[in-house]
Image (cartoon, rainbow, N blue to C red):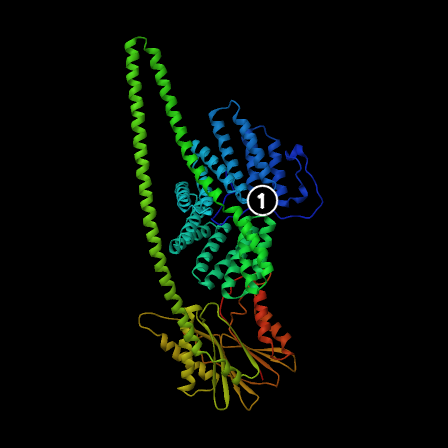
Amino acid sequence: MSNLKLLFCWIILFSFVPQVSRGQQFGDKNFYILDSIDLSLLHEDDKLLLDSSLTIYHNTLEDTIQLEMLENIVDNCWNGDIWPRYNDFAIKKVQKLLTQNRQEEERKKFAYFLAGGLSNRGFYYDQKGNLLEALNHYHESLLIYEKINNKQGTSTAFNNLGVIYSIIGDTAKALEYHNRSLKTKIELKDEKGVAMSYNNIGAIYENSSEPFKALEYYEKSLKISNSISDSRGIAMSLDNLGDIYLHENILGKAFDYYSRGLQKWTEIGFKPGISTAKNNLANVLIKMGEFDRAKTYAIESYQLAESLDFPVDIENSAKTLVTIYRHEGDFEKALFYSDSYIEMRDKIRNEQNANKAYKKSMQYEYQKEALKDSIEFSKEREIQQAELKQEKTQASAFKYGLILVFIILVIAVRSFLIKKKDNKKINEQKSQVENQKKEIELQHATLAKTHQEISDSINYAKRIQNAILPTTDVLNESLNNGFVLFMPKDVVSGDFYWLENLEDSTLVAVADCTGHGVPGAMVSVVCHNALNRAVREYHLSKPNEILDKTKELVVETFKSKSEFVRDGMDISLCRIHKNSEIVEWAGANNPLYIYKRISNSIEIISSNKQPVGVSDYSENFTNHELKLEQGDIIYLFTDGYMDQFGGEHGKKFKHSRFREIALDLGKQGIKGQKEVFEKEFHNWKGNLEQIDDICIIGIEL
C-alpha cells in the first residue's frame, strides 16, 4: 500500500483541494458508491481519478482488485471531503471480508488493506488536530502490520507515531519511533522514506537544541531528495534548514532557504507548504525589521491555513501576526490573533492528549506481549491434552503433574528473566538519555561560541568594506545630481563603487569583483587598492590608462608560484570634467548607458570584452570621449540587477527591461530614480532569492 496520506516531516503538512465555484452536481450512487458526491466541487484531476478507478472497480469480481481501486482513490485524491469517505468505505468492506471463511493468504492481503485504511484514518484525525484519535489508529495499524510481518507498513506506522510524539513533546518516544522507522527503510532500500526519516530525526535534534546534528540530518535528507527529484522532500528539507539558520540568527541564509522552499511548494501547488513557507519568511523579515513585507506574508499564510482548516498552521501564522500588530501598536488586531493562537494551541497541545498518548503506547506494548503469550499458552494446552489422553493410570497422572509443575516453573523463570532484561534496558536508556543531554548542552555551547565568532568576523569585514566606500557626504558633494543604488546579496559584497576627485575632474566607477559575500569582499579590497594606486601613485587620469595599470597591479597581486588565481573585476569607469562637456569612459565587460535628453533615446557604449585580471584574451582598454548635453544622464552598473530571476515565469530581468525603465524616467530627470529602480527590482524578484550583488550609479549632467 503506497499510503500517500503520511506525515512527511515534523511540521504537519496536510492535503487540500482547489475549490471550484459551480452549481451542485451529485454523482450517481450506483457508480460512485457513496451518497451525495458533489462532482461540481471536484478538481478535474480528482474527477478523472474517481471515474477511472471506479470503472475498474465495477468491472471486476476480484475483492483484492476492488480494494486496490479504493486504495488508489484514497492515496491520490486530495479532496479533504472525498478521500476520507472512500477510506471509511474501504475499511468496512475489508472488515466484512475478514469475517468470511477465506484462505490464509487472502486473509493476509485483507489485513494489509485494513492496516493501510486505519493509518489513513489516523492521518485524517491528525490533520484535524485530534491527536488522541490519530494515535489510536496509528497503533492499531502498527499491530496489524507487525502481525502480518509487513516491514513497509511497520516503517510507515513508526514514522507516523514518531511525528505525533514529537508534536506533543515526548522527545524520547519520538526519537525511538523514528530510528525504528529509519532502520526498516534502510533495509527496504526506500530512498524517499530514508530522506523523510532523516528530516524527522533532524527535527528532534533541532528541538533538543542540537543544531549541528539537525543540520547533518537535514542535509542528508536534501541530498537524497535531490538525487531522486522528490520535489516535496526538497521543499521540506529547505524549510528545515531555514529553521536552523533562523534560530541561529543567520538571517540571509534563513531567507534564502525559505524562499527556495516557497518556490518549490508553489511549483507543485501544495497549499499547506505554501502557507508554512510564507509564515517562515514573515518571521525572518520581522527579525530584519521589515514589518510591512512580513505582514503581507503572514496574512497570506493565515488566510490560506484558515481556508484549509489546519490548526497547526493557523496557530503559527496567528502568533506571527500578534508580533507584527503589537509592533504597529494595533492592539485590537493583536488581541484578535492572540485569541486565535491560544484556541489552536489548546486544541493541539493539551495535557490530556499527552497523558493518553503515553497510556496508549503502554497499551500497545502490553497487547503485543499478550498476543505472543496467548499463542504460547495455546500450544502448551494442546500438549497437556495430548498427554492426558495417553495417561490412564495414576502414575501417568502423577508424571503429568510433575511436567505441569516444570512448565509453570519455566514460565516463572522466563517472566523473571524478561523483567530483569527490561529493567536493564530501562537503566541503559536512562543512562543514554543523560549522556545525550550532556552532549547536547556541550555542543550547544560550542555552536553559540562558533556562531558568535563567525558573526563578529563577518561584521568586522563589513566595517572594513564600508571604510573603503565613499561616504554619503563625499557622494553628495561630488555628484550633485546623482544617485547610488547599492544592494549587497549578503552582509558584505563583491560589488563596490569608487570615487576620486582630481583638480579638473571627478573619477567615478562601479565594479563587480569575482564572487559575492566574504570571498567577493576580499577581492574587492585588492581591486579597490589597485585603483587607488593607479591614480595616486602613478598619477593616471585617463580611464583606459587607469584600467590598464589596475589590471597589471591586480594580476601581480594574485600571482603565486604554487597556485593560479583568476580573480579580478568587471568595471565601468567614467571621468567627468568640471568645466567641459566632454566625458571620458572605459569599461571592462560592463557597458555604459546614456539617456539623451534631446532625442529621448538610450545610447549604448560597448566595453572591452575582458576583465581587469587574468584572462585568456588581453588587450589595452579603449578610451571613449563623449560629448554630452545638459540633462543627459549616464548609468554605470554591475550585472546583478539585470541577471535577477523573477516575474511571472521566473526569467531574468535583462538589459532591455532596464533600458525601458531608464527611458521612461529620463524625461523627469534624475530625482526619484533610485526609489523607482529599487521598487521595480523587488516587484520583479518577488519571493525568489537575490542571486548577486547590485550596484547602480546614475548621474545627470
Q: Nearer the viewer, residue 658 or 125?
A: 125
Instruction: Name the residue: 59% across, 48% down.
Output: 308
Above or below: residue 507 compared with residue 52 = below
Left or right: 562 as drawn, with respect to 114:
left
Total number of numbered discs in the rendering? 1
Q: Is residue 94 visible?
A: yes
Q: Amino acid at mark 1?
A: Trp
The extreme top residue here reads: 393
Q: Is residue 266 visible?
A: no
Quadrant location of residue 387?
top left
Kind of element beneath mark 1: loop
Q: Nearer the viewer, residue 228 or 256?
A: 256
The extreme right residue here reads: 23
Above or below: residue 542 compared with residue 288 = below
Residue identified by numbered label 1: 78
Quadrant placement of the C terminus? bottom right
Residue 74 on image: x %, y %: 56, 39
Quadrant location of residue 375?
top left
Residue 167 on image: x %, y %: 47, 47
Above or below: residue 270 compared with residue 119 = below
Residue 355 on image: x %, y %: 45, 41
How many C-alpha atoms fall within 10 Å of the one at disc 1: few (<14), some, or many (≥20)?
Answer: many
Q: Nearer the viewer, residue 318 or 106?
A: 318
Left or right: 2 as drawn, with respect to 438:
right
Residue 404 on image: x %, y %: 31, 19
Q: Nearer the viewer, residue 191 or 79?
A: 79
